[in-house]
Amino acid sequence: MDLPFTHKPGRRERHLRRGHENPLFEWPPREVAPEDLLAAQKADHEEMEIFRESFRTLVQKAVDLEPNAGSETVLGLKEELEKHYEQACGLPEDQEQEKDAIRKLIALIMQAVRKSADNDPLAHRELQEEEQARAIHFRLLEQPLVADILHPETPIEPDELAPALLNATPEQVDAVLEIFDSDHLTLLVRQGEDLLVRLEGKGVDTTQARRRLALIQEAATLRVKLRTTGRSG
């Protein structure tokens, strides 16, 4: 069935699309019901409208910020901006303008924070490490699967994580591999292998999924090796 999936969906619709007629998620493959798709699109759109109103309020708060505002107020504003960036990555349509504005506001805040640190080398080093971590986090969030996994209300159930990874693009797989530790990756390899063996027994072509599983296996093996080397050292 051809369903009216949108070009830039939100997290709920994205996940429905992953599972639509996909044997990795259910056997026999299940079609998404039109009413379920409509409900997901409606919820995604409503979330986007709430976000945009909240974002406008947040920007106004940043504009009205007093030059001598205390560090608690400034850092609280930065945290709100970071949360809005994360949320924007899960929304439908194009949120690049909002995300760009958030990045610029955070940069201004960090500039003021660095200035207040004066000549404290430890503080400057910690701020630099924080900015590097945030840059990595924002980069990973550009991959839809990462944004959906990390969302506080993720649509991906625990038993759907392996199917989602085996169905993802190599770029999305690489990004997801950065957010899981070796134990979690090892578990995903085991779950993925069990799933593919079952599907292969039913005659399903798992060639592409096998390639994704190999990427996960390679990352899991490397993480275990590094962890073991670190302990022995």
Image (cartoon, rainbow, N blue to C red):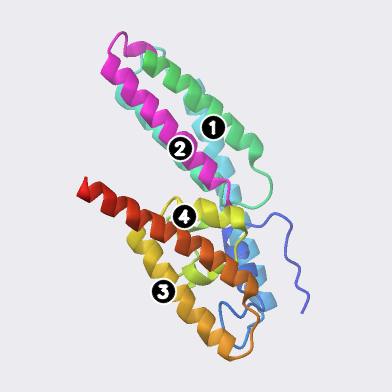
Q: Position of residue 80 (x, y in %)?
A: 43, 36
**Circle 1 is placed at which residue position?**
102
Cα separation, mark 1 vs mark 4, equals 26 Å
Name the spot of residue 117 as percent of width and height, x first: 31, 14
Mark 4 or 2, closer to the camera: 4
Q: Verify CB contact (< 8 Å) between mark 2 and mark 1.
A: yes
Which region is colored magenta? 115-144
Verify CB contact (< 8 Å) between mark 2 and mark 3. no
Residue nearest the viewer, comparing 55 with 95: 95
Which is nearer the N-term, disc 1 or disc 4? 1
- Residue at 65%, 75% (x, y): give it: 20
Res. 190 mark? 3
Judge whether residue 28 can be spotted in this image: yes
Q: Residues within 10 Å of mark 2 (few under 14, many from 20)?
A: some
Tell me the tag on residue 177: 4
- Label 3 crowd bin: few (<14), some (14–19), many (20+), radius 10 Å: some
Q: CA distance from mark 1 to mark 3?
A: 39 Å
Q: Residue at x 49, y 33 (%)?
A: 58
Position above or below: 28 against 214: below
Quadrant in the picture for the N terminus: bottom right
Q: Which residue is mark 2?
A: 82
Callout 3 amino acid = Arg
